Amino acid sequence: MRNVTVFLFTLAISCGSILIHHVDAFHVATTIQKKKCSLIHRHVGVSHIPDYEFGRNAVASTPTCDSTLNPIQAAYTKYAMISFISHLCIALPMVLLPTFLKNEVMTKLGLKTKSASEHEALQVSQKCASILLKLIPFMNLQILSPHIQDDVEDPVPTIWVSNHVSMLDTFIFLSSDEQLRGKNRRPIKTIYWKGLDSNPICKLVFSMAGFIPIDMADNGNGNPNEYNRASFKKMLKETKRAIDEGFDIFILPEGQLNPTPEAGLQPVFGSPFAIAKSSKRPIQMIGLYGCHHLWHADEETGMKVVGRDVKVKVFPPCKKEFKSAEEFIDAFNAVVGTFGASGQELSSEELDRWLA
């Protein structure tokens, strides 16, 4: 089975190399440059659980960013990024097919649980993305995770939260999960916008990995989220089931792309606090910086590449027991908002004040 997977992955690389020479291959990847709403506007990935009582407005301004690349470097980086996305869209179905067939048979025979099958599908997808990023290194990715202990065999079940700055966020999380959460990381499920299921690649990966959908309107970045309440209740039930099965949960509390990360976060909701409190799990924050320099959330900017440096920071687990959603929101804005705006983290004394 492993040989088949390797063969299919190699075939996908070959097909992708042919595909990227045709201009039409870039149309899907560059829809962000069109002046209309699309599935990608909500990002190929995750969303947040809404909290109808808590929220905070971000600073509304439009910062500018000078390019650190010359025109040739910017063009090379852009098309290398498109090449990575194109190859990944081809490779994922190919490498997941053997996993799907094997797990279907083993599940029906009672030799494997559904949860184990979902975890394996996500690991296969992560390995695929990780290999492709090494083959097509279109960005300088720096993973800062000094608090991860690879020698811990059974990590503490955790609620993970991160800011949301670019359409590249999910690709980064997919390709670097082992570096972010450690070799012995727990299985994880992400909450995402159901509209992304209209994309066949998203639907394949998300459904096989057992990700949790929530239905909301595609009303553009920077606008209040509008949720289907029936879908919200279903999502809560599926989240509780995933927690009971031992999965970590990953949420983006902003719930949408942030078109102005340098100006602060989008409105942050307190639902991660409610989930952590009900499940008696700690919250651990992740900060993203620099993804928007490659693929910006603003439609007018889109894939106008101005930099290659991307940082992902895993902050220490929250030892502090938040007393309210408002307290969590304040901490998330201070810790992750600062990192997302500048790429610089707070001093150790300030981090202790918010997290310890």
Image (spheres, rainbow, N blue to C red):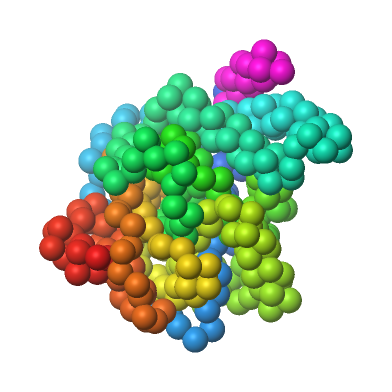
Furthest-right residue in view? 108
Where residue 133 appears, as percent x and y from the top left, is 45, 29
Whether residue 59 is situated above or below residue 107 in the rendered picture: below
Query: Which image quadrant is residue 333 in?
Result: bottom left
Q: Residue at point 71% right, 18% down?
A: 1
Q: Residue at point 33% right, 63% down?
A: 318
Q: Is residue 38 left or right of residue 292?
A: right
Whether residue 223 is visible, yes or no, is no
Whether residue 149 is visible, yes or no, is yes
Where residue 253 appears, as percent x and y from the top left, is 46, 67
Q: Is residue 19 located in the magenta-colored stretch of the structure?
A: yes
Magenta stretch mostly in which secondary structure? helix
Whether residue 211 is situated above or below residue 146 in the rendered picture: below
Where residue 251 appears, as percent x and y from the top left, is 50, 61
Q: Residue at point 24% right, 69% down?
A: 354
Where residue 65 appears, as percent x and y from the top left, is 26, 53
* Count of numbered labels shown in the rendering: 0
Q: Is residue 201 located in the magenta-colored stretch of the structure?
A: no
Q: Is residue 29 left or right of residue 270?
A: right
Furthest-bottom residue in view? 53
Magenta-tinted stretch: 1-20
